[in-house]
Image (cartoon, rainbow, N blue to C red):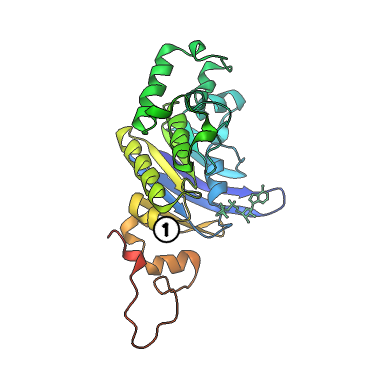
Amino acid sequence: MVEIKELVKRYPSGQEALKSVSLTLKENTVMALIGPSGAGKSTLIRCINRLVEPTSGSIMINGVNVCDLGKKELRLRRRKIGMIFQEYALVDRLTVMENVLSGQLGYVGFWPSTLRRFPQEVVTQAYTLLERVGLSDFVDNRADQLSGGQRQRVGIARALIQNPELLLVDEPTASLDPKTSRQVMRLIVELVQERNLQCIINIHDVVLAKQFAQRIVGLQDGRIVFEGQSADLDVNVLNTIYGEEDWNISKKKKEDEDDEADIFSMGE
Ligand SMILES: Nc1ncnc2c1ncn2[C@@H]1O[C@H](COP(=O)(O)OP(=O)(O)OP(=O)(O)O)[C@@H](O)[C@H]1O
């Protein structure tokens, strides 16, 4: 379980990106963080594994307050937190297999120059994960030979090889086409369920958030302005989070024109 209490982040510039944020996340749950640009979503995700240092408050992950951890303890704890980034953060010149194995470096402790230096069970686990994410035919391909969707799948396998308890996912679909975005979101949700993980996804696409996350947290100007189930995410809630907008109409309607599709009811 993740329990965040009264989390504040003030950057040295004086910008208060998080203003007393509190939330709880249980196992087997995907939580989507939505909100306008600058609301504090990335800051919140990065505070959880202390890539950004919180100013005050507490972040309990399975009973441990990560804000209290010293350098060494933090390094150990981070092994239990998988991170999936927007731009994949793969090493282009390495193969798919080497990129996945690099997720284990926290455990192995140094960069083994050949696969043979990784314990056999780790290499076997990497093969199993690559099969699970649909990349068994690309094991030896260089990362820069892959499509965006395939690269994101490598990123997912790399995060999972550390056997994390918590997955932090930052804009996983930002550079992907709509179909690939859905496939990546579906894969993440399935893996969270299969492995009984907790998962927080920072995502701009509210339709994907509504379709794939169970819980939604809406941030605005560093504060939570909505927390609920995805079914509760309706036009009124969108107005609260992003400000007034006619979410279903793309242009002014002529009198005799048919109603436009209700984009936001997709998948309901
Ligand atoms: N390193 C930094 N130093 C100073 N201010 C920062 C820093 N990083 C972010 N901020 C500020 O903190 C606020 C929250 O930024 P953050 O990136 O967390 O928002 P976000 O919701 O993730 O935005 P986006 O959706 O555009 O990525 C913004 O006002 C931003 O300018």
Task: Identify the residue shown where x is 41% and y is 41%.
Answer: 199
Reply above or below: 73 against 250: above
Q: Locate the C terminus and report the quarter of the image it occupies.
A: bottom left
| The quarter of the displayed image where residue 259 is located | bottom left
Q: Nearer the viewer, residue 86 or 36?
A: 86
Q: Find out if the beta carbon at label 1 lies less than 8 Å from the nearest ligand 1 atom.
A: no
Left or right for 39, reference 10: left
State the image coordinates of residue 191 (x, y, percent, origin top left).
34, 36
The quadrant where residue 192 appears: top left
78 on left or right of 188: right
Q: Residue at x 56, y 60 (%)?
A: 221
The three-letter amino acid code for the residue at tag 1 is Val
Image label count: 1
Q: Which residue occupies the extreme right position in the image?
A: 13
Image coords of residue 117 (percent x, y): 51, 11
Q: Is residue 260 above or below residue 179?
A: below
Residue 139, image quadrant:
top left
- Residue ID at (42%, 50%): 32
> What secondary structure is found at the residue carrying circle 1?
helix
Q: Residue furthest bottom?
A: 255
What is the x, y in percent for residue 154?
46, 33
Q: Residue at x 41, y 53 (%)?
A: 178
Compare residues 175 and 54 and report the one nearer the observer: 175
Residue 224 vertical placement versus 124 (above, below) = below
Crowding at label 1, few (<14), some or many (≥20) Cα neighbours within 10 Å?
A: some
Farthest residue in the left direction? 268
Residue indicated by mark 1: 206
Where's residue 161, x and y in %? Answer: 43, 26
User: Which corner quadrant holds the N terminus?
Assistant: top left
